[in-house]
Amino acid sequence: MQPILAGTRTERFVDYEDRNWGIRFGEALMPKVANGINLDWNVHRAHAENLEIQVQPSIWRAHKTTVRLLSYVNHANMGSYREAIDAFVEGRDPEPTIEAHRRQGRKKYGFLLNGEQQLTEFVQIYARAGWNEGRHESFAYTEVNQSVSFGGAILGNRWHRPLDKGGIAATINAISGDHRGFLQLGGKGFLLGDGTLNYSLEKIMETYYTAHLARGISASIDFQHISHPGYNRDRGPVFVPSLRLHLEF
């Protein structure tokens, strides 16, 4: 067993590890505005809790199985999609504006279930499903309320590159009815909103390859094909290539 206590000025967490299971809890600051870089240091009014439970059951001998359950609750000055919609429909606001309907102390919570299965010494697959409540505005990282993804990865041992890794994944994202209605009326979030929305699920196919170049240095090439980006049937598909360089000291 291995208890760990750690933290920085912006977060505190505790981690307890046993042989086949572990539990982690973290407390963090929240941004002052949706996806903003300035943090609210008043933890009595704005903060976030994250809890993760991990188990590694003995399902398939000599093949590692890992299951993780994550739950989080964010407390912040969040807007309500429904209040913004009602104010616009009733003529109180000239346009749907989420910023006009923020209130301190609102909560946004969600859950994630993640499973990983080792098939061989060099091949692993995963599946993941997540959900968060969609009444209050998306506040950090991205605008999504439901997501399902699955994929796999392979190490480069077969071509004598044991530190290389390649993979492929598929993801389907969705947003809540209130979130959708807000965007359809012309509302804008911190990432989404172009005046209209012909709603559809957002579907992503992604593949990557990471090459080890030297000690502490690796480079990756990544390709994404996105159907209906931003949940809009009238947008895309788009093809997104990218290059990454990773350095460790």
Image: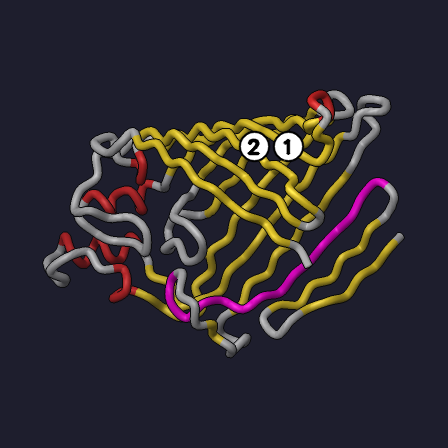
- Does residue 31 show up magenta in the picture? yes
> Which disc number belongs to residue 165?
1
Comparing 200 with 125, the one in front is: 125
Question: How many residues crowd around disc 1 within 10 Å: few (fewer than 14), some, or many (20 or more)?
Answer: some
Looking at the image, is 226 positioned above or below residue 86? above
| Residue at point 62%, 29% (across, down) | 126
Of residues 77 and 219, the one nearer the viewer is 219
Colouring convention used in this rendered image of the protein: secondary structure
Instruction: Specify whether 116 is left or right of 63.
Output: left
Residue at horizontal 66 percent and vertical 67 percent from the top: 12
Q: Nearer the viewer, residue 170 or 85?
A: 170
Q: Is residue 73 above or below residue 120?
A: below
Say what amino acid the circle numbered 2 marks: Tyr
Q: Which residue is mark 2?
A: 209
Q: What SS does tag 1 mark?
A: strand
Is residue 110 highlighted in magenta? no
- Residue 113, image x and y in percent? 61, 38
Numbered circle sitting on residue 211: none
Mark 2 falls on what kind of element? strand
**What's drawn in magenta, residue-wise?**
20-34
What is the chief secondary structure element of the magenta stretch?
A: strand
For residue 248, what is the image quadrant?
A: bottom right
195 and 111: which one is in front? 195
**Residue 29 visible to an observer of this rendering:** yes
Query: In which quadrant of the rendered view does residue 28 lie?
Result: bottom right
